[in-house]
Amino acid sequence: MASAKLGEGADAELRFVSQATATEPKLQGASYFYISSAQSGLLPGLNVIVSLPKAQEPKGVVVPESAVVWLQGKAWVYLRTGPETFVRREVTPDLPGPSGGYIVSGLAADTQVAVRGAQMLLSEEFRAQVRGDQDPD
């Protein structure tokens, strides 16, 4: 929880709104917008000391965007299970990776993911299902 120290030693709770699109020219770095209740005692232009929570380091494995296929509104990746076999596994791409792609939790660091041809694997999987559903004459 973010909070601002007021002169009397009281804290005003702050809620994050967004990153600012412009910043004060005298300040260096990014600026952010926070809001607080009207009863907090904070006034526009008031200098305050603010405490911000430390960001949690995301835990997971970075998966390139090319490895993710989308099916029925869900994200999937293909994991290598053998020299020529893969299994499709649902992932949650909530966190963006540092250089693109996604940070995915629940995968071991040494997991082999198909980073090229994932869409082709999905197509082949469904083509095999269609062939298997047909009755022989």
Image (cartoon, helix red, strand yellow):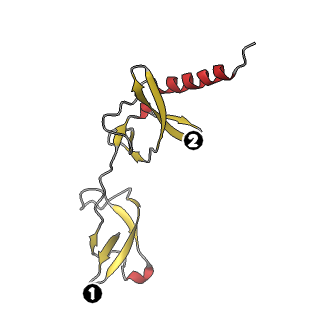
Residue 62, x across and y down, in percent? 34, 39
Residue 107 vertical position relative to residue 49 in the rendered view, above or below: above
The quarter of the displayed image where residue 79 is located: top left
Please give left or right for residue 36 compared with residue 10 in the image: right
Say which of 106 and 24 sits in front.
106
Locate residue 18 relative to residue 125 in the image: left or right. Answer: left
Q: Disc 2 residue type?
A: Gly
130 left or right of 14? Answer: right
User: Callout 1: 10 Å neighbours few (<14), some, many (20+)?
Assistant: few
User: Which circle marks residue 8 in the picture?
Assistant: 1
Instruction: Report x, y in % for residue 66.
Output: 43, 30
Q: Quadrant of residue 10?
A: bottom left
Badge 1 marks a residue whose secondary structure is loop
Which quarter of the image is occupied by the C terminus?
A: top right
| Residue 113 pos. (x, y %) | 39, 30
Residue drawn at (45%, 23%) of the image: 85
The kind of residue tagged 1 is Glu
Q: Which mark is residue 73?
A: 2
Which residue appears at 38% of the width and 56% of the height?
A: 21
Q: Quadrant of the N terminus?
A: bottom left
Q: Residues within 10 Å of mark 2 (few under 14, many from 20)?
A: few
Q: Identify the image quadrant of residue 52.
A: bottom left
